[in-house]
Amino acid sequence: MIVRAIVTDAPRGGVKLDSMDMDFHDFPVVLKPVLTGICGTDRGIVNGSLPFAYNPHGENRLILGHESLSVVVSAEPNSYNIKAGDMVVPMVRRPGKCLNCLVGRSDNCSDGQKHEAGVTGLHGFMRDRFGDFPEYLIKVPGNRKDDMAVLTEPVKNVEKVFEVLDIISRRSIFTDSAGAYHGKRAVIIGTGSEAFLFALKSMDWGFSTGITNRHPLDEIKGKLAEDTGMDFYDYSHAGIRENNGIDLLIDTSGDPGTVLRFIGRMNNNGIVVLFGTNGKAQPAPVDGDLLGSIVEKNLSIIGSVDGARIHYERAIQDIYKWKAQFGKTIEMIITGRVGPEDTGIFLKKPADEIKTVISWGE
Ligand code: DN4
Ligand code: BGC
Ligand code: ZN
């Protein structure tokens, strides 16, 4: 069938809406996207700043899209209980042959041979139809037709980070004297969608939680932060306001200079999670004092990418928990809806954007 697809040429970049002839005979499940989300990774691919992105083998274009809420058009029998009409979220990564991939943890792929839909060597979900295998489809509980489920993919990254945090934090006592995190401080660098989602999870754990950027917040983001209980400051004006030190730092900016400045404010046994990626960021020097303080403070600095099936399943639960907790406020995360033809959205991020989604129609 002829499908419309949003394509790039990775890792060079560019973006356009193309039509192509595709058949789905090799796939037990055929799907149609309802919504696809746009994230920092998509814009990084389109502007050519993510050198790790590449086209499928032997092809000169890559269909974008790794965040999707889709409806099942048809499914072979015995497809993990997936049937036509089901609402599902497809996983991003597909395993290679390393040991981690073989045990369902391609998020920890050890030889780089995995593929990622819309990012590394596998066509993504921004097209009228796609085919898939049932083991990579996460059912929306209760088959709810709720737009918020499109956030499952970005929240799964958050779930993985907090699982890693739980493991790493056991190298010392990381809780407060009550065995909780209320006396502990988490700071998230950046105010994009992943930053807000990290902050929500950090508040679930009990951390006093702040988000920060180098400019003020617009009205929508300011209201979302205030109504959910996180604080914000513009560090370019206020300086780094962390007089009691930081216990957990999560970076979504990918900006080395900013990350290093905040690392200088960590408490002993603090944990730094590097998550943002920006191949075009300005380099920043590290001096011996800063390196020495990382050692003397017993800091853990970890990188985290992607997430496994279990993290998607927990992510859907997070989203419904936040809906129950914050009601309509949480829906403010979806700040824009566009059609597939509006490819300009990849080139210029709207000033007040948290999450823009592409609606694929009925
Ligand atoms: P995003 O919406 O572009 O968020 C990035 C945020 O960082 C924006 O709010 C930026 O602000 C902010 N920022 C940039 N530079 C600075 C700086 N110097 N100081 C403070 N804030 C700054 O992207 P996203 O939320 O979708 O994703 C966040 C990052 O994580 C991206 O780099 C993605 O490529 C990466 N990512 C990694 C994984 C993974 O490891 C998954 C998903 C995304 P402004 O734009 O308002 O100025 O699995
Ligand atoms: C996706 C991850 C993926 C990563 C690649 C992110 O936007 O959420 O699943 O592994 O991009 O850097
Ligand atoms: Zn993403």
Image (cartoon, grey):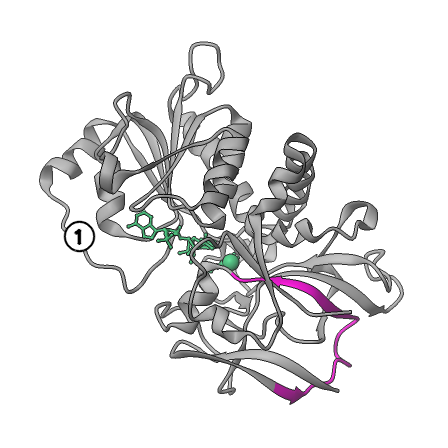
Residue 94 in sight from this viewpoint: no
Residue 26 image point, x, y percent = 75, 79
Residue placed at 31% from the left, 26% from the top?
A: 269
* Magenta segment: 19-38
Neighbour tally class for label 1: few under 14, some 14-19, many 20 plus, Cα within 10 Å: few
Q: Quadrant of residue 324?
A: top right
Amino acid under label 1?
Ala
Q: Secondary structure at mark 1?
A: loop
Residue 307 image point, x, y percent = 55, 50
Residue placed at 15% from the left, 37% from the top?
A: 290
* Side of 91 relative to 179 (left or right): right
Q: Is residue 239 above or below residue 9?
A: above
Query: Does the segment drawn in magenta span residue 7?
Result: no
Looking at the rendering, in which quadrant would you find the C terminus? bottom right
- Type of secondary structure dominating the magenta stretch: strand
* Side of 192 relative to 244 (left or right): right
Residue ranking furthest to the top: 177
Residue for badge 1: 284
Which of the two residues, 185 or 226, is positioned nearer the viewer here?
Answer: 226
Q: Quadrant of residue 265?
A: top left
Residue 360 image point, x, y percent = 69, 70
Which of the two residues, 162 or 103, is positioned nearer the viewer here?
Answer: 162
